[in-house]
Amino acid sequence: MPLHLLLRTYTLGARELWRALRDMAGPGEQQALAELTEALFTATDRVVGAVAESYLDERVALAAERHEERRSRARALLDGRPVVDGVTPDGPVLVLFVRFGTSAATGGLSPVAVRRLLRRVQAALDRAFGTEVLAVLDGDGGHVVVPGVTEPPARLPELLCETAGPELRLAAAAAMTVGDIPRAALLTSEVVRVAAACGVRPGVHRLEDVLLEYHLSRPSEGSARIIAMLDPLADRPELVGTLRTHLEHRQDRRATARLLNLHPNSVDNRLARIQDLTGLDLADPRDVALALAALLLRDADTGVTE
């Protein structure tokens, strides 16, 4: 029953009781009627307050229970496990990975603010798809599972950016069967990670946008040796940052200098120092590819993007 209807039944009851008291009051009982009326209003205030509080508490408990059920279903699908308390999708499933902006991801939001953010994001997702979607989200972001869909709505990025801020990143992949969901989940999270590591601006990311970088970031037998090429820079974070920015902007020294608040000559000096320490010639396409692979593999190995 809606809360306003529930509360109205109590106020209607109080009014009917007051009418009964008024009709029964005899001559000279006006003072007694006034006292009874005040007692009736006091009791009604307490009852309405208690009913409203209990109703809202129950609604919160039910919402939390329903939210956890949805999270459990989403976790099962993302892990490739059977759905215990729901119906397993028998058709295509759209898997999304969402990463929020830096204020949420770096702990800039309080726990209360994070909960509010997640509620707003869930509401935006439900509104965009026209149904209750399954999501596993935290302060950094997470995965979303939408059965029966293969493409996200065109307005989804706009709705999510309005809700979570312009720094939001999003990737989507379709799973044709339930068994493909874990693969799609890994793919979407990796596409977002690689896009962020490569300096791609926030927004919607596709595998095609970072195809080379995605390929270079895949672990192999030679990964450890490629990562080791940057070991001489381990104690020089400013050189690693310069190398990353330089590669992100297609080796444009002026753009690199502008973003790092340096003079272009200072960028040249840093790049020369990088070459001296690592032996990588950043004018050689092969060495540029090795440097990019080393950065991407290093990020994947440490889980940190500088």
Image (spheres, rainbow, N blue to C red):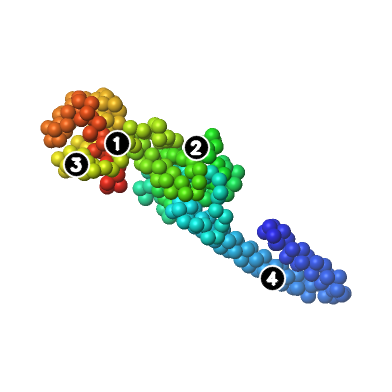
Q: Position of residue 32 (x, y in %)?
A: 78, 75
Q: To which residue does mark 2 refer?
A: 157
The relative height of residue 73 versus residue 125 in the rendered view (above or below) is below
N-term-proximal mark, 1 vs 4: 4
Q: To which residue does mark 3 refer?
A: 225
**Horizontal side, residue 227 vs residue 39: left or right:** left
Determine contact: label 2, label 3, CB under 8 Å: no
N-term-proximal mark, 2 vs 1: 2
* Cα distance in 3D space between marks 1 and 4: 72 Å
SS of the residue under disc 2: helix
N-term-proximal mark, 1 vs 3: 1
Q: Amino acid at mark 2?
A: Pro
Q: Nearer the viewer, mark 2 or mark 1?
A: 1
Q: Amino acid at mark 4?
A: Ala
Q: Amino acid at mark 1?
A: Leu
Q: Splitting the image into 4 quarters, where does residue 168 fall?
A: top left
Q: To which residue does mark 4 refer?
A: 43
Q: Which image quadrant: the C terminus?
A: top left
Q: Amino acid at mark 3?
A: Arg
Q: To which residue does mark 1 refer?
A: 216
N-term-proximal mark, 3 vs 4: 4
Determine contact: label 1, label 3, CB under 8 Å: no
Q: Residues within 10 Å of mark 3 (few under 14, many from 20)?
A: few
N-term-proximal mark, 2 vs 4: 4
